[in-house]
Image: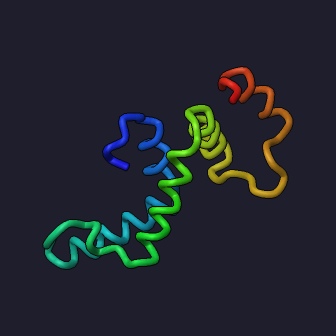
Amino acid sequence: MDESSDPWVKVSFYSDEVVAKILDKAYDRWVKSGCVGEPITYLTDDELEELYVRSNITTSANQSTFIEGMLLRAIYGELPRRGGIPKILKSFIRLFLPSK
């Protein structure tokens, strides 16, 4: 992820709530061990797999998807899951974000 030349890919990946929690846990384990080695070595296999899955999802999306997700998280705190995007917000998103 760090080698990506697209800053939106990095922003989207590292701003993901699950990614942030996983990385926080890894850094905590790393600090408790006296900062020996690299923080990535303190990830569990499940955490590594989750980061891998999320990185593949992130790199396959486009810039407008990233911005839309950040906008929705800024407004709602968490993306709405069931009802989708509220009608009033859809027109706002179309105004400021390019379509696919």
The residue most toward the top is 95
Residue 94: percent from left, percent from top: 74, 25
Q: Quick check: 9 left or right of 99?
A: left
In the image, 68 versus 76, the foreground residue is 68
> Which residue is pictured at 42% across the width and 43% down the height?
10
Residue 17: percent from left, percent from top: 52, 58
Q: Quadrant of residue 95?
A: top right
> Which residue is pictured at 37% across the width and 65% down the height?
24
Q: Quick check: 30 left or right of 84?
A: left
> Which residue is pictured at 47% across the width and 54% down the height?
55
Q: Quick check: 73 left or right of 58?
A: right
Is 70 situated above or below 94?
Answer: below
Is 47 situated above or below 51?
Answer: below
Q: Quadrant of residue 72?
A: top right
- Scheme of colours in the image: rainbow
Figure label count:
0
Q: Quadrant of the C terminus?
A: top right
In the image, 22 versus 3, the foreground residue is 3
Residue 23: percent from left, percent from top: 37, 64
In the image, 14 versus 41, the foreground residue is 41
Q: Quick check: 36 left or right of 66?
A: left
> Which residue is pictured at 80% across the width and 48% down the height?
84
